[in-house]
Each structure stands twice: as C-alpha cells, then as structure tokens.
C-alpha cells in the first residue's frame, strides 16, 4: 500500500514541480534602494504590433500580482507609487526577442521603458515555459534615473484562452 501511495504522490506532484516558478534576483534604483525579486509570472497575449502573433509578458516582482495588474502598465505604475511595488516587466516577441523592458521602483521619479538597456540570455522559450537570465550591464542611466537588475528565473507561460489562430490563405 505504501508503494502505491508514494507512486500516486509522485504522479501528482511531479507536474507541479516541473512547472513551478523560480526566481532569484535584485533590482536597484537610483543608487541606494535595492529590492529582491521573489515572484515571476508569464502570460501569452495578442501582439499589439503584430496582429495574429502572440507576445509573452513576463513580470518579475517583489510580490504576487493578479493577471489584470501584470498586463496593465498604469496599474503597475500606480502600485509602484502607492504600494512601493518593485518589479521588472518584460515583453518578448514570438521569436524570444525583447520588445521592451520596464523597471518599477518607488525610488524612480520618471517611468522608463525600453529594450535598449536589457540583456536576455534564455535557457528555455517554449510554448509552455520561459526561463533564463535577464540583466543590465551594470548601472544604466536615462531621464535622470539610474538602475540595474540581474535575475534568473523559470516559469510556466499562461496561455491566452481567447487566442485565435489565423489561417493563411
């Protein structure tokens, strides 16, 4: 009986462990204020710039956030100012190239969003999973702000339930 119970537990827990999220990293803003990134999620979304294709939005943050917040940059900015949110939101195209990256930190005076300052080394970019290292080359400066981040992560990608495949004619 114990062998069967153990096998049943492994069968239940193995898929959960294989698809668990992991993140380790830090984001520093304006020289003095640094925070650990402890949560990561990834969502597939319809590309606003490439109709018929899906982008992936990844959010590394200091707390768990619902899908509606992760996909809403205004909500993230509001949480940064009011709730002291620390996060890094990255949007990748279907080929795994970064379209933009936006660090969020209460020490910022201006909002920054660009693909110029980010380095991305993927270890997985599949339909069901994204993993790798995302970082800056040291401290970056733009619009009077200074920041750096370095994080490694792995997380399942939540697929868009409303996505539709476009058939080529």
Image: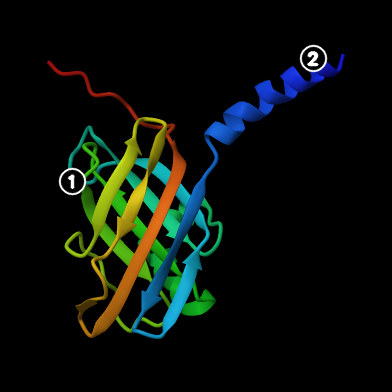
Q: Closest to the observer: 125 or 59?
A: 125
Residue 51 in view in this figure: yes
Quarter of the image for residue 167 reads top left
Label disc, if present, on residue 97 of the rendered structure: none
- SS category of the residue bearing label 2: helix
Residue 162 picture location, percent across and down: 40, 32
Q: Quadrant of the N terminus?
A: top right
Left/right placement of residue 156 relative to residue 55 reads: right
Q: Closest to the observer: 132 or 78?
A: 132
- SS category of the residue bearing label 1: loop
Q: Which residue is mark 1?
A: 49
Rendered position, 155 above or below 65: above
Residue drawn at point x = 35 percent, y = 46 percent:
132
Q: Which residue is mark 2?
A: 4
Q: From mark 1 to mark 2, how far is it between C-alphas?
A: 51 Å
Residue drawn at point x = 21 percent, y = 65 percent:
117
Residue drawn at point x = 24 percent, y = 57 percent:
119
How many numbered badges does the structure rendering display? 2
Residue 36 picture location, percent across and down: 49, 67
Left/right placement of residue 57 relative to residue 83 reads: left
* Eye-nearest disc, 1 or 2: 2
Quarter of the image for residue 140 reads bottom left
Rendered position, 53 above or below 71: above
């Amino acid at each position: 009986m114990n062998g069967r119970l153990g096998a049943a537990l492994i069968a239940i827990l193995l898929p959960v462990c294989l698809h668990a999220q992991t993140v380790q990293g830090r984001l520093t803003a304006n020289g003095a204020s640094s925070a650990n990134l402890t949560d990561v999620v990834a969502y597939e979304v319809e590309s606003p710039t490439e109709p018929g294709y899906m982008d992936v939005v990844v959010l590394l943050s200091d707390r768990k956030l619902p899908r509606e917040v992760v996909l809403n940059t205004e909500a993230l900015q509001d949480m940064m100012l009011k709730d002291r949110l620390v996060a890094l939101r990255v949007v990748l195209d279907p080929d795994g190239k970064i379209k933009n990256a936006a660090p969020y930190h209460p020490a910022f005076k201006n909002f920054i969003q660009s693909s110029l300052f980010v380095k991305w080394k993927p270890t997985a970019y599949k339909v069901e999973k994204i993993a790798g290292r995302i970082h800056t080359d040291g401290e970056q400066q733009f619009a009077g702000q200074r920041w750096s981040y370095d994080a490694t992560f792995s997380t399942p990608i939540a697929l868009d339930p409303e996505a539709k495949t476009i058939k080529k004619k």
